[in-house]
Image (cartoon, helix red, strand yellow):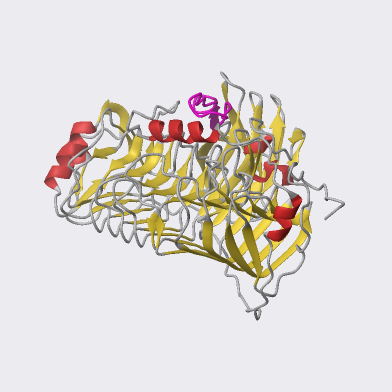
Amino acid sequence: MKLHRKQRTDQHRNVRRMTLAVSTAAALSATSLVLMAPTAHAAAAAGASLPFTSVEAESATTDGTLIGPDYTQGTLASEASGRQAVTLGAGQSVEFTVPVTANAVNVSYSVPDGQSGSLSVYVDGEKLTGSLPVTSTYSYVDTPWIVGSKTHHLFDNTRMLLGRTVQAGAKVKLEATTPTTVDVADFQQVAGPAAQPAGSVSVTDKGADPTGAGDSTQAFRDAISAAKGGTVWIPPGDYRLTSSLSGVDDVTLLGAGNWYSVVHSSSFINQSDAPTGKVGLRDFAVFGEVTERVDSSPDNFVNGSLGPGSSVSGMWIQHMKVGLWLTGNNDDLVVENNRIQDTTADGLNLNGAARGVQVRNNFLRNNGDDALAMWALNTTNSSDTFADNTVSQPNLANGIAIYGGSDITVRNNLVSDTNALGSGIAISNQKFADPFFPLGGTIDVSGNTLVRTGALNPNWGHPMGALRVDSYDSEIAAQVDITDTTVTDSPYSAFEFVSGGGTGKDVRNVTVDGATLNKVGTVAVQAETPGAATFRDVTATGVGAAGVYNCPYPAGSGTFTVTDGGGNTGWSSLWQDCSAWPQPGTADPSS
């Protein structure tokens, strides 16, 4: 279970050093230059194609108080998008200029612990009848078994249909009835509800209550049984389920749209046995009532297996422990065009035995562990892909994490604002439990954009890079190709090579081919373990301290070779003092 995984993580992290003591001579001898011809690279736009447009509160008009930017763990600003937000007192407001035609809004916000209230909504000065509820119920999560964590998960999301269509340029004002910090508003034009497809079995025909007053669990089970080989229809409404569904096999559950068909359940599907037929989950929302992280409980949208060839699309998943915790046979699963936010742990985790899985074009915000993860436990993940996803504000771990597995692709993702114990992307041999299958084959990490990613790890006592390659429990022997990466406003380093357990295992067979680094707080390359990597066409501007920190740990464990493949600019200097960590924006005068 995830509890054991995190306990294991923290036992290892506690043995990590607070400082390094590697000689300057060793650092210098570890760097070699091998000149190669430069290669041209063209970066495509990264991230998901989203149905909404976001506007940051700090760019809006307000009589409230701007907070941030701040990277200090446990503060409101550090968990906000852009590391800034606006705090409103009761009666204060923030007014957004709507950038697109819209009839709906989703707002990321925080209120003080123990408080609830609402945000009154005005359109061009006219107060709407409805309001946005705000509450601290789903925030302020504590995970004391994760060493180094503080109270986190400080933000939440609330949404409403405006009841009218507003044009680009309109003004939408949010006025607080209780002290509220507003982070970002997402404006969207939501299409009307879809119609019931012919031949489908409606849950209301089996007795489901669309008002949410009655328990609809049995009605959903009966509809699933009756529709085997076909479609279960979830009409517009709110449906309350008091226990999870199992035996979901050879059926599609279809809603009228994720703004209209809403299921309230903290454990929607929980089944360990792989179905024999495909399962489809499409176009509805599932809202849980998970208020804390209990790793022994399956408080997930999907826990277990959906079966080979299944699909999850058009879903809105919120207030669960995990969005999808996938075990068993999920071969060739497609997870696309979903919104997964406000989970107390992972957004999605492929937990072994996943082959040919495609996770693409999803939006994830405010996840309490890795937003997207693959973990090669029991059997190996292979030929799986995370592509074209947007990840924002994971508030404890990584944006995207690959723990073992073979022939994995991480392509064209946008990750921003990681916090505390994570990088934007982590490629790792940290096993957490056995049997674990280390990285193998080719790991393709290409076309990704990382914005304000990386964090000061409180357990290690030093920072984690925007993109981390980690030989935590075993050397990295797979071919790791990191191509066409954009790193912007990294608070610390851009590329980190480390053996997180402090055992000095090698990181080898790594190429960094084509990268644009714009404003890096400390160094472009943070090398802390033996091994080698080749860099080609890596351009850096605004590097805060030096180009390379090259101090393998523990002392005497070996050297890390930084090979210059040609076309590199802006990061040629070397940090000379291996007894001290570079601080953001403080250049080493001896470099």
- Whether residue 151 appears in magenta in the rendering, the answer is yes
Q: Nearer the viewer, residue 285 or 503?
A: 503
In percent of width and height, residue 569 lies at: 75, 69
In percent of width and height, residue 383 lies at: 36, 62
**At 50% from the left edge and 36% from the top edge, which residue is drawn?**
368
Q: Quadrant of residue 418?
A: top right
Residue extent of the magenta highlight: 131-152
> Is 513 situated above or below 417?
below
Query: Which quadrant of the figure contains the N terminus?
Result: top left
**At 52% from the left edge and 54% from the top edge, which residue is drawn?**
506
Residue 544 visible to an observer of this rendering? no
Q: Nearer the viewer, residue 382 or 199?
A: 382
In percent of width and height, residue 62 lies at: 75, 38
Q: Residue furthest right?
A: 589
Q: Label the magenta part by its dominant secondary structure.
A: loop
Q: In the drawing, does residue 124 fall left or right of residue 300?
A: right
Q: Nearer the viewer, residue 426 or 176?
A: 426
In percent of width and height, residue 549 lies at: 71, 53
Q: Residue furthest bottom?
A: 37
> Is 105 situated above or below 111?
below
